[in-house]
Amino acid sequence: MPHQTITDKSSLFQNVLDSRLSEGCLFSATHQKYYWIDIFKAKLFSCNKDKSDFKELQIIKKQDSFPERIGFVVPSKDDANVVYFGAKYGLAKANLKTGEWEYLALYSSSGLERDWDRMRSNDGNTDPNDSSIIYAGIMNDFHVGECTTEGAVLKFVIKGNAISCECVYDGIRIPNSINFVGKEKIYLTDSLNFQILEIPYASKDWKKEATKAIDIKKNNEGFDSPEPDGSFILDNKYFVTAVWSTCKVQVYELETYSLIYEYLIPNIDRLSCCSLASETNKIIVTTASQTVDVAGTTEESLHGAVFMIEIDQLVSHVSPNLKDGKAHI
């Protein structure tokens, strides 16, 4: 059955001028706020549903270190201004109101042998079955110039003041979104192999037990590098993913791994992440500049801005979104 392409359902949500690589977007039902990041500029953002109470925090590098980066953000349960995030060298915590931030645990504590100046965090997620668990992808930083198999997925476990870190998947160039279906399956996005991997939730060896579930390249043959990027799973039925370099958010049926819908943001090709918005018939979508290391958004150029897309085809009725985009810590 052919898929359906929808081209007229996108609208601008927020344009923070000079945004370079907006990513990590989510809606918090607990706090009734949106959160997102700029990976390249190491910035955290939040705002209310109506765009009020906008906050922006730039994470400044520590002395003698490389520039900071941010790969993902997770709000805390009790305070909308307190967030956890994947920083350049490890898991960190910040207060959007006071501007204070600190490292909680370093990636090097995983035991992986790396030159950590070459690495940065990428996407990550909490385990919805156990919010004391955070998964963080790491990959080569921008100055390295290429994405090698130094990339990996690390698992943090927070128990009070103690935080452990271990590697669960080593040897992946760009580990991207990590999603869950109950206690049955984990879906890991392997961006540069253009595929979504399926892993048993109880797996003790992710790399050995991973199987290709969704072939993104097959459904984007007209593009040189259609990389699946930030994604989420809707109602345990649909895998919804931004596809870098294509202007598309694609929707796959998990039961058959078939492409059923694709939603376009015309003329904005670098879509980087998507998540369910404050209403169940909309998604929030982040994008990236076409020259990330040189220039970002302007009043005229929206490459790097944040958008909304209506997804009426996937919902029977519109209601408030009662779920947190990532399980809060």
Image: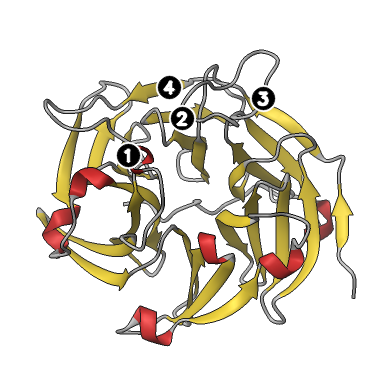
State if disc 3 and disc 1 touch (CB < 8 Å). no
Image position of 325 (left or right of 205): right
Name the residue carrying label 1.
83
Give the residue displayed 46% in from the left and 45% down from the top: 30
Q: Indicate the quadrant where residue 265 lies.
A: top right
Q: Nearer the viewer, mark 3 or mark 4?
A: 3
Q: Which residue is denoted by mark 3 in the rendering?
A: 302
Vertical relation: 286 (above or below) 95: below
Tag 1–tag 2 contact (CB < 8 Å):
yes
Q: CA distance from mark 1 to mark 2?
A: 10 Å
Of labels 1 and 3, earlier in sequence is 1
**Occupied quadrant, residue 39:** top left
- Asked whether the viewer can see residue 278, the reply is no
The residue carrying mark 4 is: 55
Inter-mark Cα distance, 3 to 4: 20 Å
Q: Disc 3 versus disc 2: distance between alpha carbons? A: 19 Å
Which mark sits nearer the N-terminus, 1 or 2?
2
Q: Residue furthest top?
A: 299
Which residue does the numbered mark 2 point to in the structure image? Answer: 46
Instruction: Report x, y in % for residue 269.
Output: 69, 40
Q: Which residue is painted at 31% across and 22% down in the image?
A: 97
Q: Amino acid at mark 3?
A: Leu
Mark toward the start of the polypeptide (3 vs 2): 2
Foreground mark, 1 or 3, reads 3
Q: Earlier in the sequence, mark 3 or mark 4?
A: 4
Which amino acid type is marked by label 1? Val
Q: Are marks 4 and 2 in contact (CB under 8 Å)?
A: yes
Q: Is residue 243 visible?
A: yes
Type of residue at label 4?
Lys
Q: Position of residue 312 (x, y in %)?
A: 82, 52
In this rendering, position of residue 188 left or right of residue 194: left
Image x and y of residue 8, in percent:
87, 40
